[in-house]
Image (cartoon, rainbow, N blue to C red):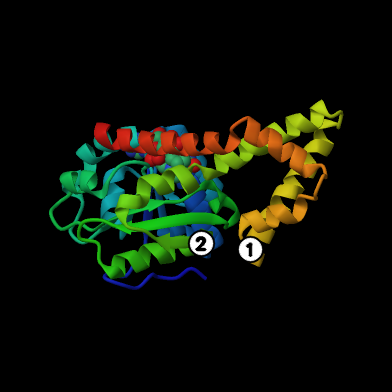
Amino acid sequence: MGGDIGGERDVHVIAVLGAGKLGEVLLSGLLRAGWAADRLIATARRPERARELAERYGIRVVDNETALTEADVLTIAVKPQDAGTLLAEIGPKVPEGKLVVSLCAGLPTAFFAKHLPEGTPVVRVMTNTPALVDEAMTAISAGSHATAGHLAQTEEMFRPLGRTIRVPESQQDAVTALSGSGPAYFYFLVEAMTDAGILLGLPRQVAHDLIVQSAIGSAVMLRESGEHPVKLREAVTSPAGTTINAIRELENHGVRAAFLAALEAARDRAREIAQQG
Ligand SMILES: NC(=O)C1=CN([C@@H]2O[C@H](COP(=O)(O)OP(=O)(O)OC[C@H]3O[C@@H](n4cnc5c(N)ncnc54)[C@H](O)[C@@H]3O)[C@@H](O)[C@H]2O)C=CC1
Ligand SMILES: O=C(O)[C@@H]1CCC=N1
C-alpha cells in the first residue's frame, strides 16, 4: 500500500498542477502503487479535462488555490511555456514548507524560486512516459532549499514508477535529451524498422511484431546481462554474415552522427526554454 512518505514533513497528499499527459501518467502510477484516490489531487485548465480525470480515477480535481492548501507536495506538470502564468497565479500564495516538484523540461529550479516565497524547497525531476508501465527513468535534482529529506521524499514518490537516479541540476538538460525524450527515439526506430519490413515484403503486423519483440528482448538483455552494447552487437554480427552489411549501411548513412546531433539539438532546446522561462 502506498502510505505516507516521511521526511522533512510527512507527505499525506500529492497534487499534480496541470494534469495533462505526463501528469496523468504520474497520477495513474501513484494509484497503482497503492495511493488512495482521496489523497491525490489534480488541477486542470479545461472543465472537460477536470471531469475526465475525476471520472477516470476517482481523484479530487480542484482549482490551483485549493490544491496549494490541501496538498503537501505540489507537482508542477504544465508545459514549460505555461509555468510563468501558473506561478504568477499561485507563487506568492504557496504556504510555507510545501515541497514543489517540477516536471518541466528546461526550467531551472531558480526560475521557480523567483516566483515562490523565500525558503520554498524545489526539486527538479525529469521522468519519462514508460512510467505508465512502471518502467520510467526518473532523474532527480535538488534545487534551492531542497534538503536530503526532500530528495528522498521525491525519490519515494517516483520509485514505484520505475528507476530513479540523482543527478546534479547542471545535468538535467542532457538527461532531458537522453531519457526524457528517449522513448520517442525508440518508437521512431521501431516505426522505421517496421517500414523496412514492409519494403522487404512482410505484412505490416508481422513486421511490427518482429521488431517489438526484438526491441523488448534486446532491452532485457542490456539490463539483465550488464554487458556493453558493443559486445552484445558483436555476438549478433557474424563474419561475412548479414548483420555487418546492415551495419555498414547505417554507418554510411551517418546514423551514429545523426544521434549525436539529434540529442545535442534536444539539449540545446532545453537550454532555450530556460532562457525564455
Ligand atoms: N510528455 C513527456 O514525455 C514528458 C513531459 N515532460 C514535461 O512535463 C510537462 C507536461 O508535459 P505534457 O504532459 O506532455 O503536457 P500537456 O500539455 O499534456 O499537459 C499540461 C496540462 O497543463 C494544463 N495547464 C496549463 N496551465 C494550467 C494552469 N494554469 N492551471 C491548471 N492546468 C494548467 C494544460 O491544460 C494541460 O492539460 C512539461 O513541462 C514537459 O516538459 C517531462 C518529461 C517527459
Ligand atoms: O518534448 C518535450 O519537450 C518533453 C520533455 C521531454 C519529453 N518530452
Observer-nearest of 31 and 129? 129
> Splitting the image into 4 quarters, where does residue 173 fall?
top left
- Which residue is at a point 49% across and 59% down the rendered structure image? 30
Eyeballing the image, is 246 above or below 128? Answer: above
Judging by the rendered image, the residue that carries numbered circle 1 is 227
Q: Is mark 1 within 8 Å of ligand 2?
A: no
Helix, strand or loop at mark 1: loop
Q: Is residue 242 left or right of residue 140?
A: right
Label 2 is placed on what type of residue?
Arg
Q: Is residue 179 left or right of residue 76?
A: right
Task: Confirm whether residue 202 shows in the render.
Answer: yes
Judging by the rendered image, the residue that carries numbered circle 2 is 163
Q: CA distance from mark 2 to mark 1?
A: 19 Å
The image position of residue 203, as x and y in percent, is 85, 31
Q: Which disc, if any, is residue 182?
A: none
- Which residue is at a point 80% across and 50% down the rendered structure image? 238
- Which residue is at a point 42% across and 45% down the rendered structure image? 176
The image position of residue 195, as x and y in percent, is 74, 29
> Splitting the image into 4 quarters, where does residue 264 fall?
top left
Observer-nearest of 191 and 90? 191
Q: Which is closer to the viewer, label 2 or label 1?
A: 1
Helix, strand or loop at mark 2: strand
Label 1 is placed on what type of residue?
Glu
Task: Confirm whether residue 44 shows in the render.
Answer: no
Q: Earlier in the sequence, mark 2 or mark 1?
A: 2
Eyeballing the image, is 246 above or below 10? Answer: above
Observer-nearest of 97 and 140? 140
Q: Quadrant of ligand 1?
A: top left
The image position of residue 259, as x and y in percent, is 53, 38
The residue lying furthest to the front in this view is 240
The image position of residue 16, as x and y in percent, is 39, 49
